[in-house]
Image (cartoon, rainbow, N blue to C red):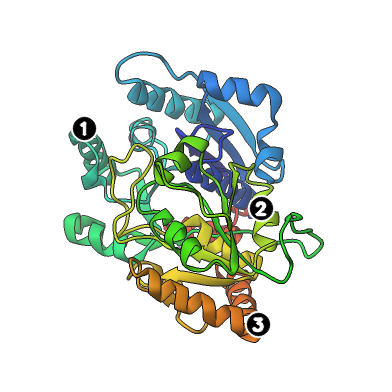
Amino acid sequence: MRIAYLSSSTIPSDSANSIHVMKMCQAIARLGHDVRLIAPDRLDTLRAQAATCPHVFYGVEDNFTIHREHWPSIKGRGYWYGLRAARAAKRWGAELAYGRNTAACFFAAQLGLPVLYESHFPINDSGRLQRALFRRLIRSRHFRGLAVITHALKEHYEHHWPELKGRITVAPDGADPLDDSMEPIPLASDEKRLQVGYAGNLYPGKGMEVVLPLARQCPWADFHVIGGTAEDLSAWLGSEHRPSNLRCHGRQPPSEVPRYLLAMDVLLLPNQKHVSTQGGNTDIGRWTSPLKAFEYMAAGRAILCSDVPVLREVAVHGRNALLCSPDQVDDWATALESLRDDPDLRKHLGKRARRELEETYTWTARAERALTATPGTDGHPSRR
């Protein structure tokens, strides 16, 4: 089947949404489909692309094509882009349009393409026009289903959009199993000290509210932050002195992040109850399925995770992670001490997490699960 993935993500970049898009395109192609990613040609994208092959940057197979559509410098550019992206999919001969871009998916349905829409937060949190396009999309005869990342989000949509009952598939995020030959990044740290890592953005609610005070409270461990900008870190530290046991590695290509994770003994997933997206205008705390949760599982390292309902859909205390009160740093320090003193527990948690990732949460399994939202599609290409 020819599947066009309609995206407005900046590619290449280190944003979680762009990683998600590239990994999903790879996974759908692995199922045997002919996949084309349609993405905008923003100027910053073109500069980055000139020096970087997107497939190499993300560490994905070159098993799908990327088509760029113009991102105009005008008011309402997102809607103009959505129309152009949908037309590009139609010209290519797509048999299914798939994506998280509401405008592009709406226009694809208007052009007669079957559409599978994916959502990572409530459309009700978007503007009036986005909600209107979504309403018309789900009532179109070309709408094939909705894929969401958590059960909490599924329940939200079923409550606010009852016509979607029976048409929603829950497909948590995923990660690729790591190659056993992958070498950890060398760290200039004392091997006898516990190495603790956090990977991801530094937006409010992502966890720096815990990482910084935890580093100060646990001077016997080395803390590593992989991600964020110097400006982000400066905003968190303010005039305070950076703890001597905290190292910031900055933004890294997605293909390199797993090597950092492998260098850690413990990985932190300290999401707060309220989590901001880029720009800070949306709270995804109740709905998010953090990409790094699955990347941590793939690394096979012990995970300390916030005890919030949406993360408990994947994390189980004492089985694949230890859960801590999201805003109680003392709770995190106690859990970290228990992992410092019990290497066998660290090994057990990491091994179980990796096994669950490989059995349930690979990108390929996710793609297959998401595509089952489309009647007549079992995740594999038709055998006509």
Give the x, y percent position of residue 60. Answer: 68, 46
Amino acid found under the numbered disc labelled 2:
Arg
- Tell me: residue 20, above or below residue 184: above
Give the x, y percent position of residue 305. Answer: 45, 69
Q: Secondary structure at mark 1?
A: helix
Which residue is at 51% across, 43% downward?
A: 228
- Write down the quadrant of residue 212 in the picture: bottom left
- For the question of whether residue 10 can be seen, the reply is yes
- For the question of whether residue 115 can be seen, the reply is no
Give the x, y percent position of residue 151. Answer: 34, 66
The CA distance from mark 1 to mark 2 is: 35 Å
Residue tagged by mark 1? Answer: 129
The CA distance from mark 3 to mark 2 is: 37 Å
Amino acid found under the numbered disc labelled 1:
Leu
Which residue is at 63% across, 43% downward?
A: 252
Nearer mark to the viewer, of 3 and 2: 3
* Residue nearest the observer in this picture, 303 or 33: 303
Q: Is residue 295 shown left or right of residue 370?
A: right
- Write down the quadrant of residue 312 in the picture: bottom left
Q: Earlier in the sequence, mark 3 or mark 2?
A: 2
Amino acid found under the numbered disc labelled 3:
Pro
Q: Secondary structure at mark 3?
A: helix
Query: How many neighbours does mark 3 have within 10 angstroms: few (below 14), some (14-19), or many (20 or more)?
Result: few
Query: How many neighbours does mark 2 have within 10 angstroms: few (below 14), some (14-19), or many (20 or more)?
Result: some
Give the x, y percent position of residue 114. Answer: 41, 42
Residue tagged by mark 3? Answer: 343
Q: Secondary structure at mark 2?
A: helix
Residue tagged by mark 2? Answer: 30
